[in-house]
């Protein structure tokens, strides 16, 4: 059996290498590519809505976005695939970051506020555009596809279903992490492309060095405000883990600049005055978000009174920011003051009618009030905006369970169980749904998981009771 699978794998890999190669638009070289350009764009379209909300949603400043969008468009049109569609957004988070997907380019309010000129902005965005033009996302997906094929073959060769399931689970976790970052060689190639793009448009490429220093300083300042360090296992550390070390990277960028073909710098090559003028309003608002960030930290520490105090301080300084009212709504939810929570969510939605966190929050209010059908409607609207929001899936699944629509609840609870397998409720709830649908095998599986995760809860005790009934029945089948 193992021999036959190995032969099949060899033939598949041979076929893949012969018929799944494409010319890289940046290097001009042929490379293994299992993702077509059309598929690449579809992946970008599907990932963009969730990516948008994972980084705080959109920051609204139409004049600033228009000004910066013109720069992004010029960089994009000067690249190797200028015909691809593209949208540019400012993300409303203090986390210093910038990223691009096929068709989607973004920079965060936090990083943008620390920049000093157009050239620095062009360097950062040029780097992100370079990832798209060199097809780095498609390369990752192609490698992951082969990885998963190898795991599937390995699983089939193992004796016993338990070993197979474990191997596939490990593979799935590894592949998910790969989607969050590029490898070191891809980062270096993106640096080179970013320097090239900005120089061709008349920017001083030496500002790419300044931009990198600003990114490093911005990250350190953000972590300091959060009471964290780079040594800790946190989101930013994960994002930056494949970036070359600072001094090494700066040395490499200097070498890239020296290797550029002749270029002409326009004016001073930086355009700092008009950049600072355009970004002035955002910079002032960004300072108020420092207060909001403290409130968010207090909220995560379950210090809801301090979180409320900080939020009211921020709202007093600027009452037109939807996130301030939204987080106050969640504070009120924790205090079980649902009427005040809804009032805050409504205020946030009056500022931004499509603000997903407040739509989700309103769904939670409806759920805790026992109005499950209205909760379902709100949660569905939340998922339309943020398809990968695991907590909305959980809320929707629980709401369907409450109205005894068990088959409808299963996929949403299942999604959340994959995202948060250690949750103390979800497996027991899934077990109940499968149980009520007469699906004994998956019910037993979920009840067993519940006993592994949280055996001493009410759901744990219910799971134990049901297993005593269902396991003998399963053995007879």
Image (cartoon, rainbow, N blue to C red):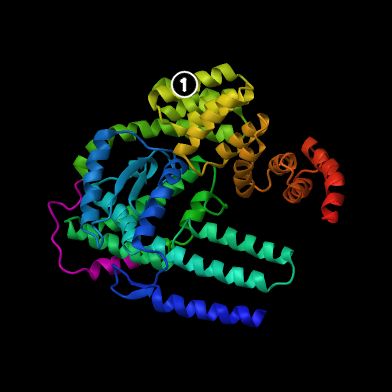
Residue 27 appears at what percent x and percent y? 29, 72
Is 250 in the magenta?
Answer: no
- Nearest the camera: 475 or 60? 475
Residue 387 appears at what percent x and percent y? 49, 42
Give the dominant element type of the magenta stretch: helix, strand or loop. Answer: loop
- Tell me if I can see residue 307 in this picture: no
- 442 versus 348 height, above or below: below
Task: Please report the bounds of the magenta region as a residue range.
Answer: 252-271
Q: Viewed as shown, does residue 81 lie left or right of 337?
A: left
- 22 versus 72 height, above or below: below
Looking at this rendering, what residue extends furthest in the front direction? 477
* Element class at badge 1: helix
Query: Which quadrant: the C terminus?
Result: bottom right
- Nearest the camera: 370 or 247? 370
- Tell me if I can see residue 426 in this picture: yes
Q: Viewed as shown, does residue 175 lie left or right of 288?
A: right
Residue 207 appears at what percent x and percent y? 26, 55
Q: Which residue is drawn at 53% across and 24% down?
A: 329
Residue 98 appears at what percent x and percent y? 37, 50
Residue labelled with disc 1: 346
Q: Which residue is drawn at 20% across and 50% down?
A: 270
């Amino acid at each position: 059996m193992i021999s036959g699978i190995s032969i099949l794998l060899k033939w598949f890999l041979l076929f893949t290498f012969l018929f799944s190669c494409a010319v890289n638009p940046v290097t001009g070289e042929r490379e293994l590519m299992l993702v077509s350009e059309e598929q690449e764009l579809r992946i970008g379209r599907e990932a963009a809505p969730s990516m948008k909300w994972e980084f705080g949603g959109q920051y609204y400043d139409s004049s600033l976005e228009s000004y910066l969008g013109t720069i992004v468009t010029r960089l994009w049109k000067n690249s190797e695939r200028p015909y691809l569609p593209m949208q540019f957004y400012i993300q409303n988070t203090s986390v210093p970051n910038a990223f691009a997907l096929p068709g989607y380019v973004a920079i965060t309010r936090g990083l943008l506020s620390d920049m000093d000129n157009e050239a620095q902005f062009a360097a950062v965005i040029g780097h992100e555009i370079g990832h798209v033009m060199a097809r780095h996302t498609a390369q990752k997906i192609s490698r992951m596809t082969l990885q998963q094929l190898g795991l599937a073959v390995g699983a089939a060769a193992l004796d016993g279903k338990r070993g197979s399931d474990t191997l596939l689970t490990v593979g799935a976790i590894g592949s998910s992490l790969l989607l969050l970052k590029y490898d070191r060689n891809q980062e270096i190639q993106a640096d080179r492309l970013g320097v090239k793009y900005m120089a061709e448009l008349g920017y001083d490429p030496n500002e790419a060095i300044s931009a990198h220093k600003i990114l490093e300083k911005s990250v350190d300042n953000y972590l300091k405000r959060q009471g964290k360090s780079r040594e800790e296992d946190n989101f930013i550390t994960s994002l930056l883990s494949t970036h070359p070390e600072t001094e090494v990277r700066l040395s490499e960028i200097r070498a890239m600049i020296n290797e550029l073909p002749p270029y002409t710098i326009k004016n001073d090559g930086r355009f700092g005055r008009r950049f600072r003028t355009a970004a002035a309003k955002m910079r002032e608002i960004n300072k108020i978000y420092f207060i909001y960030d403290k409130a968010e930290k207090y909220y995560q520490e379950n210090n809801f009174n301090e979180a409320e105090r900080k939020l009211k301080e921020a709202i007093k300084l600027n009452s037109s920011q939807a996130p301030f009212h939204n987080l106050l709504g969640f504070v009120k939810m924790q205090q079980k003051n649902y009427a005040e929570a809804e009032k805050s969510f409504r205020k946030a939605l009056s500022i931004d009618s499509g603000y997903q966190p407040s739509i989700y929050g309103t769904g939670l209010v409806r759920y805790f009030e026992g109005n499950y059908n209205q909760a379902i409607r709100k949660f569905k609207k939340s998922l339309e905006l943020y398809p990968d929001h695991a907590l909305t899936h959980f809320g929707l699944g629980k709401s369907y369970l409450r109205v005894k629509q068990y088959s409808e609840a299963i996929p949403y609870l299942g999604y959340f169980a994959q995202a948060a397998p250690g949750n103390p409720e979800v497996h027991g709830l899934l077990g109940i749904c499968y149980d009520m649908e007469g699906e004994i095998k998956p019910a037993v599986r979920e009840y067993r998981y519940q006993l592994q995760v949280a055996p001493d809860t009410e759901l744990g005790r219910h799971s134990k009771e049901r297993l005593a009934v269902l396991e003998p029945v399963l053995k007879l089948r």
